[in-house]
Each structure stands twice: as C-alpha cells, then as structure tokens.
Amino acid sequence: MEILTPPHVDDRAEVATLGITVVTPFRGMLKVRDQLLNELIGWLDQANVEPRGHFFLRLLTIDMNGPMELEVGVTGTSHPGDDRVRPGVLPAGQYASLIYRNHALRANRALLEWSEAEGLVLDKDEVPAGDQFGCRYEAYHTDPRQQPRKTLWDVELAIRLRAN
C-alpha cells in the first residue's frame, strides 16, 4: 500500500451525488462494485450526463460476516435519476481521510487506527444490521474509464466524524 496523502481531518461541504444502492455480502463486494460502476457509467452515457466529480463506493452499513449496504455513484453530478439510479448527497461535516494506492483493507485499517489514536469519534452507530455510518466512502481520483487497473487508482478514503 502506498499512502499518497497522510491521514488528516478537514471540513467538507455537502456534495450532490448520483448512485445505485444495493445490499450484498462482504465476500464478493468488490465484484459487485465493479458491476455497478459499469452499469452507472453505461447509464450516464445513455442519459447524456457527463460526470463532474469522482466515482465512489460508499459503505452505508457494514457487516463483515453478513450483508452490506453500499452505494456506487458519482459526485458533483445532479440529475433526477430513475428507479435504479438515484440522486443523493455526501453530507457536510468534518472527515478523517487519506489518499492511497492499492490495498484498500490496509488503508482502511490505517485510517481507523489513526483516528482512534487521535481520539476522533467516527459518525457510526451499531445497529442490528451491522455498523451504520453517517458517511464512509472511497472516491476514485483516478477515472476508472481511463485506467482499468485498480492497483493504479489513487483512492481517497473518507469517514465523517461525529458532530459535537
């Protein structure tokens, strides 16, 4: 894993999104992400919508041993969508984040350990379905349409902090 930007906290404004939300098992989640990313890119092309931001994977509810609720989308793009592709937002707030290349699990572990060491409180609740996050996502700074090799993507990992 290569850390391109070390962990830090910053304030972020609300960002419009357009995405597809599904529930899938943790095992095979990245294959589902890739399928949804291809579906979304095809939908954007067919709707003549040019993405203005980054594609992303948002983890809404995490259960490493069961189903996970996730969203694959694009930021900064406004459109009414349809029954499958829906508008939404990445909410405003303070976020702990870093940018990495390769090895998502290691990058997630690094950000979580750093956040804990810094005494930061993540916007997360334990619910029967798993850990539910106010906002936790990976934004792909490398356009997957231009670079198919995921190990070469620059990825921003961001988790919103609980408001005081």
Image (cartoon, rainbow, N blue to C red):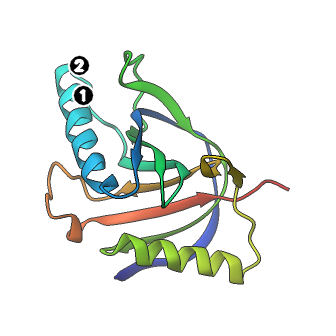
- Identify the mark at residue 79; answer none if there is no mark: none
Residue 110 position, x and y percent, is: 52, 80
Residue, x 63% and y 49% (percent of image)? 132
Q: Name the residue under label 2.
A: 47
Kind of residue at disc 2: Ala
Which residue, as the protein is rendered here, is positioned at the far right? 164
Residue 48 position, x and y percent, is: 21, 21
Instruction: Give the image quarter of residue 39.
Output: top left
Q: Is residue 17 above or below residue 8?
A: above
Kind of residue at disc 1: Leu
Residue, x 62% and y 80% (percent of image)? 114
Query: Viewer-proximal residue, 44 or 133?
Result: 133
Number of numbered callouts drawn: 2
Disc 2 and disc 1 in contact, CB within 8 angstroms: yes
Query: Viewer-proximal residue, 103 or 14?
Result: 103
Residue, x 34% and y 82% (percent of image)? 1
Tag 2: Cα neighbours inside 10 Å, few (<14), some, or many (≥20)?
Answer: few
